[in-house]
Amino acid sequence: MTWRQPRGWNVCLACPHASWPCGPPAGTWPGSCSRPVHQGVCMEVSRLRPRPCDEAADTSSGDDPQQLWLVLEGIQDPRNLGAVMRSAYFLGVDRVITSRRNSCPLTPVVSKASAGAMEVMDVFASPDLASFLQAKAQQGWLVVGTVGCPGPEISQSSKVPVTSCLEFIWDRPTLLVLGNEGSGLSQGVFATCQLLLTILPGRHLPPGLESLNVSVATGILLHSICSQKKGFPVQERGQRLQDS
């Protein structure tokens, strides 16, 4: 009979070198750790909480016009929040700001959905997003909101220009604001937006399909913006494809 290494065996072997105590097998772990949704290793750590937004507000744009912060208002599904953070980290977002109220906390489910990005990103929480956005606008940042397919209700209720994400020009520090999965941006946050971005569909859509899941929309919006950043590897990839 061939012996198979248990999952996480290499991590357990490395623990003594890092002075980490290594506990009993996974089958004896209490609570959620005993469920088969992990990779064979669990670590006991302190709870991760967002940092106070005052620390982020004190940061100036400096000499870099291509700073991008992602602002999330009322994202409640932990898997959506995790997927959003994963895309944000992958594409180069500098910081993530969340609303302190009516938002999903930083839970193990969020961390798992983010593939660990939650653990390494700068995440902040604000008790008053509207005031935070107004303050950043006064510092010279561009506050960019997001909407679904622009309809008559948007054009009639707001004088804020709406543009396709493909036409957006990123030439100044920007705050990209996304709202709740169902209700979108609140009126107070919406009123702070200087521009609204939308993702145009590829066909005529029936009622009920005018918008995308917030994590999917975030990935599309961030890629359309971050691909304008100097050093983004789009041209290099295209060159390699041509060479091959």
Image (cartoon, grey):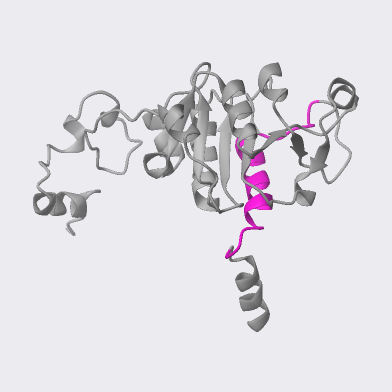
Specify whether residue 4 is painted magenta.
Answer: no
User: Which residue is at 50% across, 32% downward?
Assistant: 57
User: Which residue is at 57% across, 48% downward?
Assistant: 67
Q: Tell me where residue 34 sits by quadrant.
A: top left
Horizontal arrangement in the rendering, residue 142 relative to residue 69 (left or right): right
Residue at the far bottom in the pictured view = 243
Number of disc labels: 0
Specify the quadrant that holds the N terminus.
bottom left
Q: Tell me where residue 179 sits by quadrant.
A: top right
Q: Which of 28 and 157 is in front in this view?
A: 157
**Is residue 116 shown to the viewer in this render?**
no
Q: Which of 35 and 91 is in front in this view?
A: 91
- Percent position of residue 221, x then y: 67, 44
Q: Give the range drawn in magenta.
A: 208-231
**Is residue 78 shown to the viewer in this render?**
yes
Specify whether residue 210 is painted magenta.
Answer: yes
Relative to residue 216, is residue 75 depicted above or below? above
- Percent position of residue 20, x then y: 12, 44
User: Which residue is at 42% across, 44% downward?
Assistant: 117
Horizontal arrangement in the rendering, residue 9 relative to residue 19 (left or right): right
Relative to residue 217, is residue 14 depicted above or below? below
Specify the quadrant that holds the C terminus.
bottom right
- Percent position of residue 2, x then y: 18, 59
Horizontal arrangement in the rendering, residue 190 relative to residue 15 (left or right): right
Q: Which of 133 and 98 is in front in this view?
A: 133
